[in-house]
Image (spheres, rainbow, N blue to C red):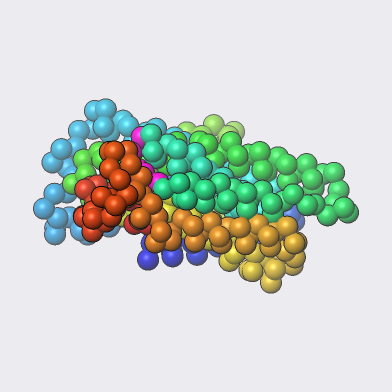
């Protein structure tokens, strides 16, 4: 359910920003740093209210082992700081790219995520799943290999800059995402999800507030920018609400699945964004885009297909020196991993 919600919300994220740009004369009509701060504050408020509502029914609330000044608490500041930088880079990329192109190139981070998940979390993937990650990246690239001959230099430069921003942001996002998954699953695993969200969102509010204030000339202009973003700018409040919902869905997917599942859920929004953009903004998919979308669909099948359970089991047994015939007797054995995401098709 969280994956489906994330797919829909990720699609609406780019579409809402595109609609706001259309109403704002082609530019984002609000302060993006203010939008990021408001998003973090809203996520914190929702997490706090949810945790308070759940607290009476919890045997372990997270407060039992919580220490304000400690390394575990400070660790949440790292992904929180990275997320603030990422969110601002996302707004920059959204202002330079159309929604389908943005969604496809945003999926680049799935490759460094897979590598870091293997190194930091020990998550295993079959050889077919690794191929599917490469195909997903290929699908992203194919969609923008053919530009219209009538496009101006400024448009081509904007696309190139937007893609470059997304590539750099993808590597940063991979590191912060895997670290966040580690905090949610490994660091004090008994603590409720919303209690952990409160910690990372608290750091997010502090970091975003510092960045937003540094961009303002005075407290009055900063307050005016916040008010304009939330209440006056076209679709500003709705964009903040949508982004907050995206963040909460991401934490749920990391808790019950993993980062690669989150990445595939986000990439599924490519198809939805292209269909919606063709209706709302006149986006006409090129042959290259359709080919890239087809490659993405193939990557989905290769990654989530049932064949991966068998391949992963054989890979594990080969590492232990057993033959395939011996390993076939163990296919029904339960997965010893503490996380459901550790085995192929179970991701």
Q: Residue sitting at 20 percent across and 33 percent down?
A: 67
Which quarter of the figure has residue 278? bottom right
Q: Is residue 160 visible?
A: yes
Residue 135 vs residue 197: left or right? right
Give x and y (percent) for residue 259.
41, 48
In this picture, which residue range is highlighted in magenta? 120-125
Give x and y (percent) for residue 208.
47, 38
Give x and y (percent) for residue 225.
57, 46
Magenta residues, dominant SS class: loop
The reply to whether the magenta stretch includes residue 192 is no
Residue 142 vs residue 82: left or right? right
Q: Residue sitting at 43 percent across and 61 percent down?
A: 305
Judging depth in this view, the residue of 263 and 72 nearest the camera is: 263
Residue at the left extreme?
Answer: 59
Residue 46 vs residue 219: left or right? left
Up-down: is 264 above or below 37?
below
Up-down: is 83 above or below 50?
above
């Amino acid at each position: 359910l969280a994956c489906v919600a994330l797919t829909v919300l990720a699609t609406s994220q780019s579409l809402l920003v595109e609609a706001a740009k259309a109403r704002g004369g082609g530019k984002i009509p609000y302060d993006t740093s203010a939008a990021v701060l408001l998003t973090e504050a809203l996520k914190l408020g929702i997490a706090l209210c949810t945790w308070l509502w759940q607290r009476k029914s919890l045997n372990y609330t997270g407060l039992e082992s919580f220490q304000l000044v400690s390394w575990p608490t400070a660790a949440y500041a790292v992904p929180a700081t990275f997320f603030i930088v990422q969110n601002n880079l996302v707004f920059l990329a959204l202002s330079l790219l159309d929604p389908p192109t943005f969604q496809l190139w945003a999926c680049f981070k799935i490759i460094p995520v897979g590598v870091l998940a293997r190194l930091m979390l020990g998550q295993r993937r079959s050889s077919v799943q690794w191929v599917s990650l490469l195909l997903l990246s290929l699908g992203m690239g194919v969609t923008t290999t053919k530009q219209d001959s009538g496009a101006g230099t400024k448009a081509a430069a904007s696309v190139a800059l937007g893609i470059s921003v997304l590539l750099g942001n993808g590597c940063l996002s991979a590191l912060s995402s895997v670290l966040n998954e580690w905090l949610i699953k490994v660091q004090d695993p008994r603590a409720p999800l919303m209690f952990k969200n409160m910690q990372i969102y608290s750091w997010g509010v502090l970091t975003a507030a510092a960045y937003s204030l540094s961009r303002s000339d005075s407290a009055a202009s900063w307050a005016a920018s916040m008010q304009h973003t939330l209440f006056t700018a076209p679709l500003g409040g709705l964009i903040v609400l949508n982004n907050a919902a995206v963040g909460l869905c991401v934490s749920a997917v990391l808790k019950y699945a993993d980062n690669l599942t989150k990445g595939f859920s986000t990439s599924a929004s490519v198809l939805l964004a292209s269909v919606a953009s063709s209706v709302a903004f006149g986006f006409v998919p090129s042959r290259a885009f359709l080919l890239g979308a087809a490659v993405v669909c193939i990557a989905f099948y290769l990654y989530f297909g049932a064949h991966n359970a068998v391949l992963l089991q054989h890979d594990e047994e080969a590492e232990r020196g057993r033959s395939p015939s011996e390993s076939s007797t163990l296919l029904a054995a339960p997965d010893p991993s503490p996380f459901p995401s550790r085995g192929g098709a179970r991701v």
